[in-house]
Image: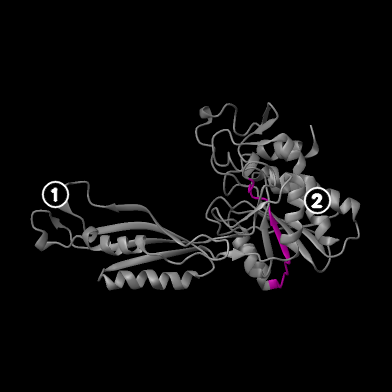
């Protein structure tokens, strides 16, 4: 068994469901210390964060990942125990195999090889890991970035190992991500009997026109390679369960995925302006998940394009699609950010897996990226 498959298997065997790291970072820190890295544990609340560095000064390249995984769901639905790494027909199965313990293992092996071959390399290579990427992402990289900002930690380039490939390793290069803004909206009415609507105020009826306007709105035409901003209602709840009672309150959950045309504060203002125009009596609680980021053409993007083309046999698609990643917290520090990782077809699913051949190729892919950037 190759070094990277062995390490990925060890990490998969640790039941590190968010925010529990289950000792993954401790095992990685020990390995990197043997390779000459300085390590620092940055624990906030129940979340473990590992910062490992080699070298001094600029430029600073960070490999960014997470050791936590989503719950596996019913274990009986899996062909094998989700936390017992199993290889079948050239494929490694287990929760986190693709998202993203395989990439984390590849990061470690690549960094070990890099410092062994280039012990006096210029600048700083670093690994940043968290156990709070799949959860609320409050005490993970978000909090680490705040600490870095306070102590003046510079980051020039960031490579996130999220599973970004679609059909084959290296066929997609993620060069940005949309921002995410969520809200819980409470619309107040007056409860009453459905036979006497004049004695009540139905918050559902009042809110529907405003919600319809927000859902139908064309927010923008997109930005560069970003799609247009999207407003989506994810949950609506009201009523007592009886069909003859007008509810006294309506609760609505919605989310905006937005491009760099917007910032969260401005979107909040626009949404609340619509609510006020419709005369709603409401309260709203906002959660800013992260602003959008975009890496324009530069050394990081150019090097990544060339390296991925060599691995996949064709120039990668350069995309900003998908959900969010922890790079949204690193980009505001002034870093150029990209995402490069294995095929994402099985992430968060039953029988999550990664091709052993792809996993064994990942360390060399990351090593080539690091070497080219520091050349």
Q: With 307 as the anchor, is 214 left or right in this view?
A: left
The structure residue drawn at horizontal position 26% and vertical position 60%, both measured from the top left corner, is 208
- Majority secondary structure in the magenta region: loop
Residue 255 falls within the magenta-colored stretch: no
Residue found 67% across the figure and 29% down from its top: 86
Q: Name the image colouring.
A: one colour
Q: Horizontal and vertical percent for residue 231?
A: 41, 60
| Rendered position, 45 above or below 99 | below
Mark with earlier residue (2, 1): 1
Does 299 sit above or below residue 79?
A: below
Q: Quadrant of the C terminus?
A: bottom right
Q: Is residue 45 above or below residue 91?
A: below
> Over which residues does the magenta segment extend?
151-165
Count neighbours of disc 2 (C-alpha within 10 A) and say few if under 14, some if 14 to 19, many if 20 or more: some
Q: CA distance from mark 2 to mark 1?
A: 66 Å
Bin the neighbour count of mark 1 within 10 Å (Cα to Cα): few under 14, some 14-19, many 20 and up: few
Please indicate, yes or no, whether residue 75 appears anywhere in the rendered image: yes
Q: Residue at x 23, y 63 (%)?
A: 206
Q: Disc count in the image?
A: 2
**Which residue is more in the foreground, 192 or 315?**
315
Above or below: residue 110 compared with residue 14: below
On screen, residue 375 versus residue 289, left or right, reads: right
Relative image position of residue 348 (x, y in whole percent): 55, 41
Q: Position of residue 93 (x, y in %)?
A: 64, 33
Could you say whether the residue bearing mark 1 is in a helix, strand or loop? loop
Q: Quadrant of the N terminus?
A: top right
Give the residue at x 44% y 69%: 267
Q: Which residue is mark 1?
A: 244
Q: Are marks 2 and 1 in contact (CB under 8 Å)?
A: no
Q: Which residue is mark 2?
A: 367
**Viewer-proximal residue among 47 and 241:** 241
- Residue 54 appears anywhere in the view: no
């Amino acid at each position: 068994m190759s070094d990277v498959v062995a390490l990925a298997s060890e990490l998969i065997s640790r039941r590190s469901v968010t925010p529990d790291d289950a000792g993954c970072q401790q095992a990685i820190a020990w390995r990197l210390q043997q390779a000459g890295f300085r390590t620092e544990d940055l624990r906030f609340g129940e979340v473990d964060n590992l910062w490992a560095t080699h070298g001094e000064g600029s430029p600073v390249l960070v490999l960014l990942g997470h050791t936590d995984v989503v719950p596996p769901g019913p274990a009986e639905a899996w062909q094998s125990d989700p936390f017992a790494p199993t290889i079948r027909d050239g494929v490694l199965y287990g929760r986190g195999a693709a998202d993203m313990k395989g990439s984390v293992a590849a990061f470690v092996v690549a960094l070990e090889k890099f410092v062994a071959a280039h012990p006096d390399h210029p600048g700083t290579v670093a690994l940043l890991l968290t156990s709070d990427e799949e959860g609320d992402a409050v005490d993970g990289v978000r909090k680490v970035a705040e600490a870095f900002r306070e102590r003046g930690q510079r980051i020039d380039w960031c490579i996130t190992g999220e599973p970004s490939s679609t059909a084959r390793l290296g066929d997609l290069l993620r060069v940005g991500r949309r921002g995410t803004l969520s809200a819980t909206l409470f619309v107040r009415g007056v409860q009453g009997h459905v036979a006497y609507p004049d004695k009540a105020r139905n918050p559902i009826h009042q809110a529907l026109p405003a919600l319809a306007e927000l859902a139908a709105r064309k927010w923008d035409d997109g930005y560069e390679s970003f799609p247009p901003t999207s407003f989506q209602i994810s949950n609506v709840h009201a009523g007592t369960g009886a069909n003859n009672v007008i509810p006294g309150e309506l609760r609505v959950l919605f989310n905006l995925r937005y491009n760099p045309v917007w910032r969260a504060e401005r979107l909040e203002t626009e949404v609340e302006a619509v609510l006020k125009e419709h005369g709603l009596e409401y309260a709203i609680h906002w959660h800013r998940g992260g602003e959008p980021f975009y890496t324009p053409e530069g050394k990081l993007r150019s090097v990544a394009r060339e390296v991925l083309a060599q691995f996949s046999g064709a120039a990668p698609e350069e995309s900003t699609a998908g959900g969010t990643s922890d790079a949204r917290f690193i980009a505001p520090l002034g870093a150029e950010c990209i995402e490069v990782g294995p095929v994402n077809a099985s992430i968060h699913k039953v029988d999550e897996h990664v091709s052993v051949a792809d996993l064994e190729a990942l360390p060399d892919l990351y090593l080539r990226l690091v070497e080219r950037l520091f050349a």
